[in-house]
Image: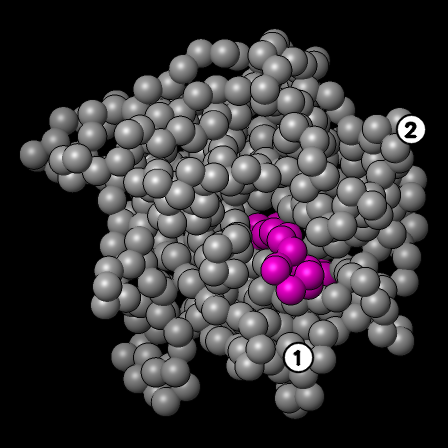
Amino acid sequence: MATPLVPRLGTPEPSRGPDRRVAERWRACLAGCLLLLSGIGGCGGPVAKPRSDPAPSRVDSASLSPTPSPGAPSPAPAEPAGLASPTVDRLEPRPSRAPAGAARIRLESVAGGFEQPLLILDAGDGRSRLYVAERAGTLRAFDPTEAFEAPRLVLDLRASVETDHPEQGLLGLAFHPDFESNGRLFASYTAVGGDARVTELAYDRAADAFDPTRERELLRIPQPAKNHNTSHLAFGPDGMLYLGVGDGGGANDPSGNGQNPASLLGKILRIDVDRMDHGLAYAIPPDNPYVGEPGHAAETWVWGLRHPWRFSFDRGSGALFVGEVGQADWEEVDRLEGGPGFTGANLGWPVFEAEHCLASPDACSTPDARSMRPPILSYAHSDGNCSIIGGFVYRPLDAGDRLAGTYLFADFCSGRIWGASPSASGIWTQRELADTDLSISSFGEDAAGRLYVSDLAGGAIYRIDSER
């Protein structure tokens, strides 16, 4: 069974006092519900929902396997009565642990009252609004330049989204690169019944909202367990849709999906949503690295993943940065260069957890294991850390900003935010930028390159500002 994403409450190190933040988070988890370490989610109340009729799409039969026992879901709170008024307070970081003179960050709240926010998105249509996805299946819009603006409901998929388990819900959204002209939005969520489902929705300009009755299914992936349901979505600079899928759940990948090239689980997939191949609701790009390779799912871009909760493309270099959630000891960041000639990659799970051998020494020393790609960064489950939240490379309009070009990421349990950058020799190192009390569930990026974080427990959205 996967390790719960709740703060670890072991005896503190002698040199440190009791960790106030860990204790507070534990109490909050008992009172309500936070997440599970094997993935990000919440504890929304179960709702009886009808299954919608699926459109023709691929069903991943290779992912069908015996169901490990996922354990009982966390207690569900009552259905929220509605959105509270947005907050406008400022959260100041704790004293710096960064090198003297190094740029750090401060967090400015721009909206609040959300119920378990999991995503922050910009539609890229030139409007000064952001979209926030809530775990239960709703999408709300607000303008961060307008103080006190109440978030507006623009999509409600609650009738289709399963939330009985803390790691289920509306987990991924991506606006088409040409959304301003074509109004296409793509969603990834746990469907009623437990399958991972990827769909397309259409924007109704007259209503300024998305109509769930016009939903079209692209892909359905059966899940052997109720956790590791990650299905993050992002369009790459090549216009292809990238889909991150967890290994299907359970400790140590009991179904073997991470190292099963035929399964769509434990992978990042790459599909073309502007074309359709025969029998599919999408097309497989002919330059995908495993097209035509026997035994490999042609949709696969990289494999050997456990739970790629959040990933993003660097708008400067085009590289893909993946925040890969670890199991018991290590979290990792992977960086992948795509483009013409990309031959794919095996990131190693469950042979390795980050760069550390998880299998037997013999299994970790085979030629195949030695060819598995290690992460650029990893950090241990210590000092309150437990689950990485992948972020973005900071690309502000002000190229003179001292944090420009830095990859920002966070940890859910500790609330810390780090920045990472490479040395002249290509070695990546990280430094702490802020030590917050937030339950950070996601980062977001707007059209101007400004970055935001969502606080799952507090229901607020914060803008990240670089301190000079």
* Mark 2 vs mark 1, CA separation in Å: 39 Å
Q: Residue at x 83, y 35 (%)?
A: 210
- Which one is nearer the viewer's eye here, 199 or 358? 199
- Residue 229 position, x and y percent, is 61, 52
- Which one is nearer the viewer's eye here, 76 or 72? 76
Circle 1 is placed at which residue position? 287
- Residue 61 position, x and y percent, is 74, 71
Q: Relative to 142, does residue 185 appear above or below in the rendering?
A: below
- Residue 199 position, x and y percent, is 79, 51
Q: Residue at x 47, y 75 (%)?
A: 346
The magenta span reads 221-243
59 lies left or right of 256: right
Mark 2 or mark 1, which has the lower sequence index? 2
Q: How many marks?
A: 2
148 lies left or right of 324: right
Circle 2 is placed at which residue position? 206
Q: Residue at x 62, y 82 (%)?
A: 290
